[in-house]
Image: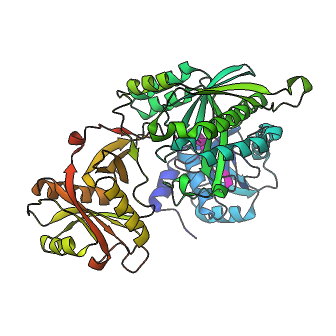
Amino acid sequence: MTALNLSTRRRLQQLPQIQSVWEGDRRPLRGEGLQVSADWMEPGAEQSPEGECILWVDGSQGMVRAMDVVTPETGPEAVVRTLLRAMEHPHNPGSPARPQKIVVRDREILFFLRGVLQDLDIVLDYVPDLPLIDEIFRGFQEAINTRPPQLPPQFAEPLLKKALEIWHVAPWEILADHQILAIEVNRWDVKTLYASVMGMLGMEYGILFYRSLESLQRFRQRVLVNESLEEMEEAFLGQDCLFVTFESASDDEDEPDLDLGTLPLSEIEPVFGNLHPLEGLRSFLYEEEAAVLLVALEAMHRFIRQHRQKFENEAFPAVNSRYRIPSPEVSEEASSPISVKVSTLPDLAVELLAMAGADEDDFPNVRDDLVPENSFLSLGVVPWDMLEFLRSGTEYHQPQDVKEAGDGLPVVMIQTSRPKAKTLIQELQAAGGLKAICFNPGENPFGGDRYDLGLFQTENGELHLFGEFGEDDPTHVAARKKWDQRCKKTKGYCGLIIAKGLTGANRGNPQFKDMMALFETHSLTPKELGLGTLQLRLAVDWM
């Protein structure tokens, strides 16, 4: 059995001992949606409806001193960890102290505590019932039972079906988040909803339905002027909108940067909610909210299917259509079809871009569909003697008048399958070739995360994202430092190598025979590229 360190024991013995009896227990969190206050939990602890709650309360004073949530597999040591926190760092308004007595209803916990808490002058006892903890858990369960479901029962199936239809037509493939659609409903105290689409950069997918233009514009302005995480959070919670976002049904924590656009429809899960300056974030909808959202989604779905071709190549012309949408209400007086008008707002799109310091002509459009998914990327150097072999031995070579300097030519290596490598080479050729390789700063305006974005610039002027690297990634930081040093020695010359063999024995270490193309080109600094820090298009972690 693990014992307390002598130093820890001495520290606990120095705490004042109060004439109180504490109750302690560990119970399963039964019931979907059971949540406990994060203020009572250990910093960084995650809540899980499948977990177990450890609770220590002062039965004499009737207050919670510490609470934690753990997985069922966690050992009894977690009970002690929470108890030590109850003694040394209790939840307000408690002060550090040792109890005179501890009672538990689990004999295994009692046995474990007796072995650990020796020499602390605390009486340990078994009781069949813990009235204060029982009352607390009854309160938890009542809160669960009285909380509305995420969707009203009569709207759950239609809304989920309609959201997946929206996912299928993928409006983020043709609409950026500043290209707003006005949806005139004129029902349920809502005149017009203003739809903003998220997902063009493959970060977060969803649609925000603002109840007013003022709310949308105010949010954009606040995001641009606020820099701290607290200010960003306040701006986020100050929105007035309904929303539907999309998540992975498997919730795979091993792939936090997974692009949902690569998943099959069966793996996509819609999430609905409401934001309001006075209510904050609410992850469920009431009946009228569900009804208006269902009608808005149906109208938007029809509009995208009818006019999709008009929005290709970044176009956003003035378009409007009117649709008769079946009423989702069942009463006879409200069952007649609803006339809904959907319109584009091109002038507003220009205004929102101007608000961000750009216009429609110079706003950077960075594509992320050039480099194949799951490619192996690396930054390195090709020695000058090997470069001569590559120039003559690869299937395709784009030459430059490179002057030899330093230890070799700095290169970006992309390794993928042979068919995908051939397609990548052909697409670069069709774009006129590779004009430049550059790294440019990017940031998430909500999380405060900063990135080093790897970009290819093709001769036709397009920018293509080939890599997104965290600024705190030590491997990339070291490789990027060497890249800059080598490019300085070569006067800006660099290269791109496209290799096959992603699934073979040479994965991550392609050999000469695997290298299919060499594009010699130039490197550009962020200043030369002139884009400034790229915002990750207001990507939001909604839930």
Please state the extent of the stretch shown in magenta in the rendering: 35-54
Give the prevailing secondary structure in the magenta stretch.
Answer: loop
Q: Residue at x 54, y 53 (%)?
A: 261
| Image-based side of 232 in relation to 186, left or right | left
Residue 71 location in percent, x, y? 64, 59
Q: Quadrant of residue 70?
A: bottom right
179 is higher (above) or lower (below) than 508? above
Q: In the picture, which quadrant includes the C terminus?
A: top right
113 is higher (above) or lower (below) than 394? above
Q: Which of the pair 367/394 is nearer the observer?
A: 394
**Residue 36: in magenta span:** yes
Q: Quadrant of residue 514?
A: bottom left
Residue 3 location in percent, x, y? 54, 66
Q: Residue at x 48, y 23 (%)?
A: 348
Q: Residue at x 19, y 58 (%)?
A: 494
| Image-based side of 262 in relation to 409, left or right | right
Q: Residue at x 47, y 27 (%)?
A: 349
Q: In the picture, which quadrant includes the N terminus?
A: bottom right
398 is higher (above) or lower (below) than 237? below
450 is higher (above) or lower (below) than 181? below
**Total tally of numbered discs in the picture:** 0
Can residue 468 be seen in this snapshot? no
Can residue 396 be seen in this snapshot? yes
Q: Which of the pair 343/327 is nearer the observer?
A: 343
Residue 477 location in percent, x, y? 28, 55
Q: Which of the pair 220/282 is nearer the observer?
A: 220
Residue 8 location in percent, x, y? 48, 56
The furthest residue to the right:
332
